[in-house]
Image: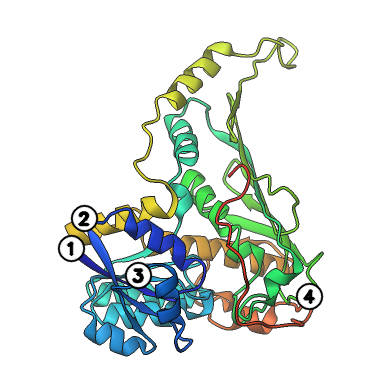
């Protein structure tokens, strides 16, 4: 039975608690910590974790709770320090997205895992979804042909009170806006399906949230050798209609699910009937997808528990988390500097380092209010994807 601790008991911690509870024969949540005195004890009672020991002191928890694994569910700016402390204490780590606000911090986390012989996984729960797994299987099959163009709509909507929470809305504590903290889901999926681009251009804006320094909208173009991907990152889209649309040489495939396969007439214009045989083959492949036993956080937590138990690499490791942060960093650098940014980013690039974003990013507005907590539930998935 693996002994699990949770560091940070804000709203996203509930998704981790639910995930671990799906595997009662494999693990037990035995410890909770939060930096706010008394909060871990109160949240433990709310979540029905009466048997878990609660700690206001993290060092005490790491020293006495005999943990196998911790989930880190704290604000992004704290991820690196907390992850490294846990790894050095001999505990495997599952850390929430984004991995950290800078590549320098990501690399320090990866190094700490290697130096201490521990496992590090970064939450990317949308890879554990049947619709996304189906889309990847179709692309990997080659039936659609080489990719030409991808439209990624990471469309969310958040009202003004969203940025009232104390750590949101500043470059220093949140690490960025919707590109880092919302679209990282879709950017990770893009990397998973297409690999890393060779260059990025982008534009950043804050169109509706006057109580936040950070962007609430960005549009990026990712350049591949023979393809382009457009990524819209937003918290201003009513309806949160999210989508990934892949146009390939022989067919279009997308989530929400749609398949179209055009064929050419002698003059190059599309024939009305298209290519029904190819559509049928793609539909058959999609229909044959074996459903995942668990989706979302539950799926990733199940994988991580198995990885810890069997001492094998997790499906999503620190390098995966780093790649997503690298792409976000390139989008920010391109938008701030108003230039094309080549990938990969080198360690001598100013944007590799911790603190560069805080120094160089524009303050679209100044944060006007700050509260310790907000009522209501969080949403970890929108309409579509």
Circle 3 or circle 2, nearest the eye:
3
Mark positioned earlier in the residue sequence (3 or 2): 2
Q: Position of residue 125 (x, y in %)?
A: 45, 53
Mark positioned earlier in the residue sequence (4 or 2): 2
Q: Residues within 10 Å of mark 3 (few under 14, many from 20)?
A: some
The tag on residue 284 is none
| Mark count | 4
Q: Residues within 10 Å of mark 2 (few under 14, many from 20)?
A: few
- What secondary structure is found at the residue carrying circle 3? loop
Circle 4 or circle 2, nearest the eye:
2
Locate the N terminus and report the quarter of the image it occupies.
Answer: bottom left
Locate the C terminus and report the quarter of the image it occupies.
Answer: top right
Mark positioned earlier in the residue sequence (3 or 1): 1
- What secondary structure is found at the residue carrying circle 1? loop
The tag on residue 25 is 2
The tag on residue 1 is 1
* Residue 319 seen in the current view: no
- What secondary structure is found at the residue carrying circle 2? loop
Residue 252, quarter of the rendered image: top right
Circle 4 or circle 3, nearest the eye:
3
- Alpha carbon of mark 3 to alpha carbon of mark 2: how far? 16 Å
- Alpha carbon of mark 4 to alpha carbon of mark 1: how far? 49 Å
Q: Position of residue 365 (x, y in %)?
A: 79, 78
Q: Which residue is mark 3?
A: 49
Q: Are marks 1 and 2 in contact (CB under 8 Å)?
A: yes
Q: Nearer the viewer, residue 222 or 313?
A: 313
- Alpha carbon of mark 3 to alpha carbon of mark 1: how far? 17 Å
- Alpha carbon of mark 4 to alpha carbon of mark 2: how far? 49 Å
Q: Which residue is mark 4?
A: 364
Q: Are marks 3 and 1 in contact (CB under 8 Å)?
A: no
């Amino acid at each position: 039975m693996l002994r699990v601790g949770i560091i940070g008991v804000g709203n996203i911690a509930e998704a981790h608690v639910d995930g671990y509870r799906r595997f009662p024969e494999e693990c037990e949540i035995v410890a909770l910590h939060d930096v706010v005195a008394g909060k871990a004890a109160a949240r433990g009672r709310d979540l029905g974790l009466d048997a878990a020991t609660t700690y206001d002191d993290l060092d005490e928890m790491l020293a006495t709770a005999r943990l196998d694994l911790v989930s880190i569910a704290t604000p992004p700016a704290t991820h690196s320090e907390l992850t490294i402390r846990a790894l050095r204490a001999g505990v495997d780590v599952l850390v929430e997205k984004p991995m950290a606000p800078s590549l320098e911090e990501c690399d320090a986390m990866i190094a700490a895992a290697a130096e201490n012989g521990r496992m590090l996984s970064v939450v990317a729960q949308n890879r554990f979804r049947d619709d996304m797994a189906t889309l990847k299987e179709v692309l990997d099959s080659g039936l659609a042909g080489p990719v030409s163009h991808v439209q990624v709509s990471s469309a969310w909507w958040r009202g003004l009170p969203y940025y009232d929470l104390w750590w949101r809305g500043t470059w220093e504590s949140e690490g960025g806006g919707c590109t880092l903290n919302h679209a990282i889901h879709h950017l990770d999926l893009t990397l998973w399906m297409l690999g890393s681009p060779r260059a990025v251009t982008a534009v950043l804006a804050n169109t509706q949230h006057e109580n936040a320094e950070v962007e609430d909208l960005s549009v990026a173009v990712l350049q591949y050798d023979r393809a382009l991907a457009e990524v819209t990152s937003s918290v201003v889209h009513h309806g949160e209609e999210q989508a990934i649309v892949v146009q390939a040489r022989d067919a279009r495939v997308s989530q929400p699910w749609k398949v179209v396969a055009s064929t050419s007439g002698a003059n190059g214009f599309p024939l009305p009937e298209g290519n029904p045989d190819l559509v049928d083959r793609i539909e058959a492949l999609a229909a044959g997808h074996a459903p995942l036993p668990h989706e979302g956080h539950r799926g990733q937590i199940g994988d991580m528990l198995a990885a810890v138990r069997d001492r094998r690499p997790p499906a999503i490791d620190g390098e995966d988390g780093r790649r997503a942060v690298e792409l976000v960093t390139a989008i920010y650098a391109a938008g701030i500097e108003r230039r094309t940014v080549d990938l990969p980013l080198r360690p001598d690039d100013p944007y590799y380092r911790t603190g560069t974003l805080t120094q160089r990013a524009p303050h679209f507005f100044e944060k006007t209010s700050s509260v310790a907590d907000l009522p209501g539930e969080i949403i970890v998935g929108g309409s579509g994807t």
